[in-house]
Amino acid sequence: MIEPKADVALAELPGYLLRRAASVMMTEFATRLAPLDLRISELTVLFVAGSDDQLTSSDIGQVAGIKRANMPKLLDPLEQQGLIRREPLDGRRSAIILTDKGQTRLNEARKVITEFEADLLATVPARHRNHLVPALDALRNYGKG
Amino acid sequence: MIEPKADVALAELPGYLLRRAASVMMTEFATRLAPLDLRISELTVLFVAGSDDQLTSSDIGQVAGIKRANMPKLLDPLEQQGLIRREPLDGRRSAIILTDKGQTRLNEARKVITEFEADLLATVPARHRNHLVPALDALRNYGKG
DNA sequence: TATTGTTATACTCTATAACTATA
DNA sequence: TATAGTTATAGAGTATAACAATA
C-alpha cells in the first residue's frame, strides 16, 4: 500500500476531489442502471422528457446540459427501444414524448435513482450532508454568474 | 429560455449535481491548463510524480485513481516533452522522475491550480464552503468503506 | 506464480464544424 | 436570416483482456 504525501496534497484540492467523487459516483450509478439497459445520459434525457411532453430535442439538451449535436445519438437508441417517440410540432421541430414503455422504464429507473441518491447522501457525514446540494448547485453554475 | 419543472427535479438530485458540477469544473480547469500544454490527467500524473521520485507507473496510477493500463498513454507524451524520465529500478519497474523542465512546468501549473481552486471555492456560498472538501472526500471513498 | 509495463480495444461523455430544411 | 435537427469527427477519461518480461 502506498502512503505518499502526494495523496494528502491531492486530497486537499476541491477540484480534484470533485472530479474523483463524480467519477466514483458515475461508475456506481452506471452499474446500477445497467440492468435497465440505460446509460446515465440516456436516463437524464428520459427524465427530462418525462417532465413535459412539449419539449424539443434542443429544449431537453438545454435543460440537461447536453449540446444539441449530441442529442440524436441519445434519442435514436431510445426511440429504437420504443421508449420515446418524436412528434412533429412543425416542419422543423419535434416534441420528444415518452411512450408507455418509456414511462414504465422511467418509473423503474426512478426507484434506482431514489435508492442510489439515498445511499450517496448516507455516505456523507451527517454534519456536512445538508451543505452538499447547495454547494454543488453553486459550483454547477460556475462561470454563469 | 426554458423554465421546466424537470430542472427543479434534477437540481434536487445530489448525484446529478455532482456530475454537472464536475463537468463544468473540468471544462474550466482544462481551459486554464491548455496554455501549459497539459491535460488534467497529465497534470495529475505530474503532480503525484513530483511528490516522490521513487514512484512507479503503477504507484502513480494507484494514488491518482488511474488504471495502470492507461498510464503509458499519459506518460509517453510527458516523456516526449521532456517533463519526466523513466529510471529503471530493476528489470521490470521504473521510477517516474520529473526532469528540471518537468519541475518548472509543475511549478507553473501549481500557480494555475492555486488560483483555480480559490476561484472554485469562492463560488460556493461561505456557509457551505468548509463542508465541501469533507463531503467530497467521503463521496470519493464511496464503495470502499 | 504473481507482478509490471504495455498494447489493443472499446465505451461514455463532451466538443466543434458544417450541412439541410424549415421558420 | 436565424433556428432545429442532424451528421461527422475528435478529444478526454475510463474500462477490460491479454501479452511479454521479470520478480
Image (tube, coloured by chain):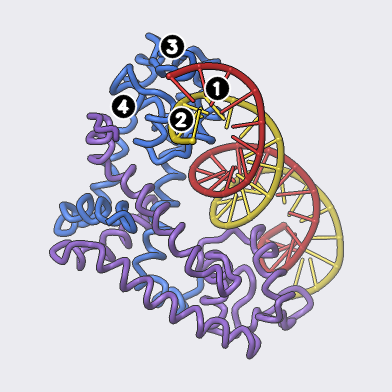
Chain colours: A purple, B blue, C yellow, D red
Q: Are marks 3 and 2 in contact (CB under 8 Å)?
A: no
Residue matched to label 2? B42
- The three-letter amino acid code for the residue at tag 3 is Glu
- Per the rendering, the mark at residue B103 is none
Of helix, strand and loop, which one carries label 4?
Answer: helix
Which is nearer the N-term, disc 1 or disc 2? 2
Residue drawn at x 29%, y 35% as measured from the top left: A1
Q: Do the residues at discs 3 and 4 belong to one chain?
A: yes
Mark 4 or 1 closer to N-term?
A: 1
Evaluate whether label 1 is on the same chain as label 2: yes
In the picture of the structure, the residue carrying the numbered disc 1 is B77
- Residue at 18% x, 62% y is A125
Front-lying residue, A57 or A6: A6
Please state the horizontal and vertical placement of residue C19, each as a whole percent of the image: 84, 53
Mark 1 in CB contact with mark 2 (< 8 angstroms): yes
Indicate left or right for B131 with A119 as reference. Answer: left
Q: Nearer the viewer, mark 4 or mark 2?
A: 2
- Name the chain under label 2: B
Mark 4–mark 2 distance (CA, rounded to whole Å): 13 Å
- Left or right: A143 in relation to B117: right
Q: CA distance from mark 3 to mark 1?
A: 16 Å
Q: How many numbered circles does the render carry?
A: 4
Q: Which residue is mark 3?
A: B87
- Residue D16 appears at what percent x and percent y? 57, 49
Which residue type does callout 1 highlight?
Answer: Pro
The residue pinned by badge 4 equals B110
Q: What is the secondary structure assignment of the residue under circle 3?
A: strand
Question: Residue shown at 74%/81% (left/top)?
Answer: A88
